[in-house]
Image (cartoon, rainbow, N blue to C red):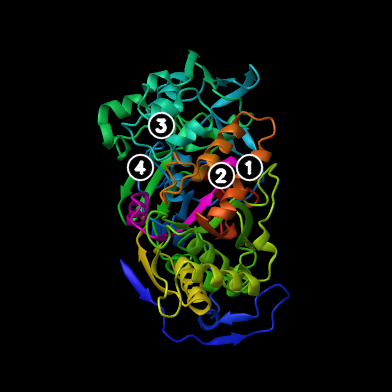
Amino acid sequence: MTTTSLPENAIRETLPVDAGVCRCIPAIVIFLMLMALAGCSETEQVSAGDEALASADIDAPQTRLSEHPVTGEELARKQVLVRGNASEPASLDPHLVQDTVGSAIVVDLFEGLSRSGPNGDTEPAMAKSWSSSDNNLTWTFHLREDGRWSDGTAVTAHDFVYGWRRAVDPKVGSNYAYYIESAGVENAGDIISGEKAPETLGVRALDEFTFEVSLAEPITYLPDMTVHYTMFPAPRQAIEAHGSDWTKPGNMVSNGAFQLDSWHLGEKLVAARNPHYREDDKTIIDRVVYLPIESSSAELQRYASGELHMTSTVPVSQMARLKRERPDELVMAPSIATYMYAFNVHRPPFDDVRVRRALTYAIDRNVIVSYITRGEQMPAFTLTPAYVSGFDFRQPEYATWSQTRRDEEARKALKEAGYDEDNPLEFELLYNTDESHKALAIVVSQMWKEKLGARVTISNLEWKTFLSEKQAGNYGMARFGWKGDYNEASTFLTLLTSDSGNNDGGWSNREYDQLLLDARSSQDPNRYYVLAEEILWKEFPVAPVYFNTTVALVSPTLKGYPENNPRNIIYSKDMYVTAD
């Protein structure tokens, strides 16, 4: 773990900025801006092609097609897609994956009942159709009969029954077990708590290709939820044969467009086209190479040299340069995602709501999105983004205040909590290793120092360790990001229910839990969502910073990247590589 202490003396600079943006910019922000300018030397425009193929260092067949069957574009001689993927996945088991790193891979290896279309709409996948009855208490999914596992065996309704039961089985230990419960599936909560057996879950196979789901409360958006990997089918034959080793190369069986070919830890993971996939004839990419590059700067360098077709992110320090030099390659798309900091409410000083309120107020979000991230992010004062489908978005009162007033109220709250110059607030802020997360942690910590006299030590851990420590509650305050699993407000608000596997900060509120429970069976869930958000505005279990966007670099030779999908689900099978 690396720790960084902020300088004792802080200088303040004043810049002319737009109305509504705090005019006092901490010196650390100026420093980061100057560092960005110092790194603004122009780079040669190199497109990913032979360089990417060489860097992948894998065997790949010649493409089956010389040109795209629809567009007529000339295709690269070998269809190898090289993707930056931020870090090493903690797991490839769909029921144990819990992050965007793992999900980016499993959505290529597996396929659920539905999928996300290029614009974020829910489309049929393994299910060719579905219907509801009994006022949305019963959902019936009619499966395609041509679905196959990578071992050639048929994918049936029994595989979905097995997968969903496995997701809630306490013995499996899925961090996403609550997802099945939040979908209202009958008996899910009792199974997760150990009171009932997984076999009592409200799912059954009516026949080989008809999957039925029984809900305890009616939910209209269940098909949207089935896009998520927690609701993917599971290959009983592989899991029973290999146990926890079933996700290793040579053991894994999957039903997606690709199958696991090789996995060299710390270097690359390779997926090969699955010849048994139901639409294999429509898949153009033959191999996908996922590179676990934790440093966004290193990822950018490899992209600039033509070794990658797409990055997982972009360093915030390079946004201005890339907007100028590579505007056609820089993707900045809306995303239903929130960047925030989580408080462990069981650890002092964060067990005091006045401290949480003070730190939340003192974050100057306008400075952050205008001068630090610069990727069209939107300041966030709520957990749920404004553009979530059908959500009655409202702002807390403090969002309407000037930053000057928020700072004044923050100082009052901290003084009431017993902190002042003689007894300064001290704590550690934890984030996962990444230049952009580090830059933001430095800026936010400096804001707290200058405005509140707080003494903040920032510390970072590599992704797997960070995830493990955060889940164990081994932190006081930590970076937290959430991308909606489906386009409905509950995907955000259920994060903080008492039984949520992602609520590692330990905050619990019975009224909040009940509101989310009541929302499930309501014809107008928005009124419950609004009341739930209002509780968060008073309790501050998290400090929202901004509503995120998808920011990435995409090579001109890579076609089919879903630039308009707010879910930011990227299926490699939808893309192809053109000739240089």
Residue 368 in the magenta stretch? The answer is: no
Q: Is residue 539 above or below residue 363?
A: above
Earlier along the polypeptide chain: callout 1 or callout 3? 3
Q: Amino acid at mark 1?
A: Tyr
Residue ID at (56%, 51%)? 536
Q: Are marks 1 and 4 in contact (CB under 8 Å)?
A: no
Say what secondary structure mark 3 lies in.
helix
What is the C-alpha distance between the residues marked 1 and 2? 8 Å
Q: In the rendered structure, which segment of residues is drawn in magenta? A: 464-492
Q: Which mark is residue 529?
A: 1
Tell which tag, 2 or 4, sits nearer the viewer: 2
Q: Quadrant of residue 117?
A: top right
Is disc 1 in contact with disc 2, using a CB cutoff of under 8 Å?
yes
In the image, residue 461 sits, relative to residue 202, either above or below, namely below
SS for callout 4: strand
Q: Amino acid at mark 2?
A: Leu
Q: Please tell me whether mark 2 sits on a helix, a strand or a loop.
A: helix
Q: Nearer the viewer, mark 1 or mark 3?
A: 1
Residues under labels 1 and 3: Cα distance? 26 Å
Question: Mark 3 near mark 4, Cβ–Cβ under 8 Å?
Answer: no
Give the Cα separation between the discs numbered 2 and 3.
21 Å
